[in-house]
Image (cartoon, helix red, strand yellow):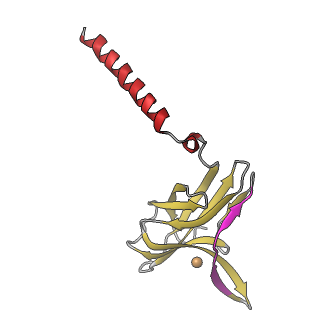
Amino acid sequence: MPRRSLSVSLVLATAALLAGASLAAPPASSAPPTPVQVENAWIPQPPPGSEVAAAYFTLRNTGDAPIVLVGVSSPVASEAMLHRTLVMNGESMMRPVASLTVAPGRSITLEPGALHVMLDGLRKPLQVGESVALVLHLASGEAIHVSARVRPLGSE
Ligand SMILES: [Cu+2]
């Protein structure tokens, strides 16, 4: 019966895949992914003609080891950096941040006037409602893919 032979070959193919996977998989790949949650990722729409934008989100560590964010990238910008806004002598200025560490069970929120991702060299205008891809690079070597929603300027 054609039906039976199909299911037999599927079983064989699955068994072969499983055998191959268990032989090829190093022990590290069976470890669970980094317990990091990214919530409420958003970008205020930059003014027309602007080549920079800021991105914000909350990074939550649900695991039992620290999470260290060491960089960000995005296909919409030629460069993405971690920044902190400071007020010194009444003047607002931004400083690069080398890394952000989130302790187990804690979270860090990037928000206007404080920590943010600076997207520089925007390759195209960002439309309200658009989802912008961000990749968060962890010290562990993992990459966390995030979708940030563009909101109207002044909605923060
Ligand atoms: Cu900045």
Q: Which residues are magenta?
A: 92-103
Q: Does residue 133 appear in the picture of this structure?
A: yes
- Residue at 66% x, 78% y: name it: 85
> 46 or 41: nearer the eye?
41
Residue 23 position (above or below residue 147):
above
Query: Residue 49 sits in which quadrant?
Result: bottom left
Q: Position of residue 150 (x, y in %)?
A: 49, 63
Q: Position of residue 45 (x, y in %)?
A: 49, 70
- Residue at 73% x, 48% y: name it: 64
Q: Position of residue 81 (x, y in %)?
A: 55, 73
In this view, the residue farthest toward the front is 23
In this view, the residue farthest toward the top is 1
Residue 147 position (above or below residue 97):
above
Ligand 1 shows up in the quarter that is bottom right
> 140 or 69: nearer the eye?
140
In this view, the residue farthest toward the bottom is 89
> 7 or 88: nearer the eye?
7
Q: Main secondary structure of the magenta part?
A: strand
In the image, 67: left or right of 16?
right
> 85 or 128: nearer the eye?
85
In the image, 13: left or right of 42?
left
Q: Where, quadrant-wise, is the N terminus in this rendering? A: top left
